Amino acid sequence: MMRRSVMTTLAIWMLLAGAPVAAQTVPEPTPIVIGQSWALPSAVMGAPREINVWLPPGYAEGNQTYPVLYLLDGGTTWQDFHHISGLAQLGTVNGTTRDVIVVGIASGDRRNELALPTEDPELIARYPTQGHSARFRRFVAGEVQPFIEGRFRTSGETALMGESLAGLFVVETFLKEPQMFDAYVAVSPSLWWDGGRLARQSGALLREHPDAAKTVILTLGDEGEEARVLMETLNAHLREDAPLGWTSTFEPRPGETHATIYHGAALDAFRHLYAVAPPAD
């Protein structure tokens, strides 16, 4: 009898173990929303363009105005909006940087939008759509900046950040249209484009502009001799030919590669540009 009872209990347990668990009501997931996104109509570009905005957590609670960081390659898929806006959020949470609005300007055809025209026939053949950075700059100045300034409480303090080809666009912008932003952050800029012509012309371009207060932050990883020489050329002209009031810093990062340099360099740039003011005595 005892054996039959044990066998019966074991059979029931095995049957229950193999049976599906009774369905439970699981609530629908709540999306995690970190920002706002627009398909901004653009007459300059001829099609709507993706613009993403991160606001400081306390934005809705008062009337404070905020500096704006404009981020190139600022899309949410395979681009840099998430990790750069995360640095802004981190600075707010731990109190190490001032609150800032991050505006991500998504890229489409990067060599079309971020690279200046080249005279190199090999590059022209490889990238036939290249060389329209001036048009993209008109889009940023004439459509993106007015959209942001008209919709959000901005303080008038602006910065432009980009890496690689976007860093090249940053360099070209402060050399040719420095009035567009107050500060410029170029991480591992692709100065090799068009044989390094932009770096070699940087002195003459800098001398064309009146005195103004601008901040330039440059950094470069371990990216070979050509990249190092071109960065040295650009930095030499910034020291010798920049208008009065300009401040430029260069921090080499030999322990980083082109693929690994951006996040840490961007964090340091945040701490430089948006340092928290010391408490008043």
Image: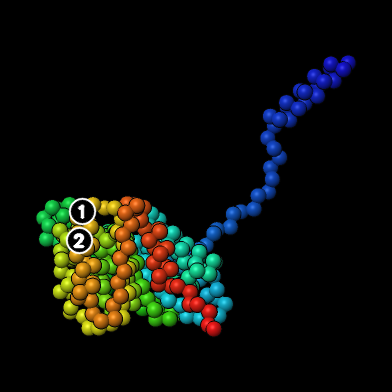
| Residue count near mark 1 (Cα–Cα under 10 Å), binned few <14, some 14–19, many ≥20 | few
Q: Residue 141 carries which label?
A: none
Tell me if residue 80 comes above or below residue 99 in the rendering.
above
**Amino acid bearing label 2:** Leu
Does residue 41 sit above or below 5 in this rendering? below
Question: Residue at the location (40% across, 59% down)?
Answer: 264
Q: Quadrant of residue 112?
A: bottom left
| Residue 44 in the image, given as x and y percentages of width and height | 27, 72
Q: Mark 2 points at which residue?
A: 230
Where does the image place residue 260, in percent across and percent down from the top left?
Answer: 36, 52
Between 74 and 202, the one lying in front of the other is 202
**Earlier along the polypeptide chain: callout 2 or callout 1?**
1
Q: Which residue bears the numbered disc 1?
A: 225
Q: Which SS class for mark 2?
A: helix
Distance in Å between CA atoms under marks 2 and 1:
9 Å
Residue at the spot 34% in from the left edge and 61% down from the top edge: 73
Label 1 secondary element: helix
Q: Can residue 58 be seen in this view?
A: yes
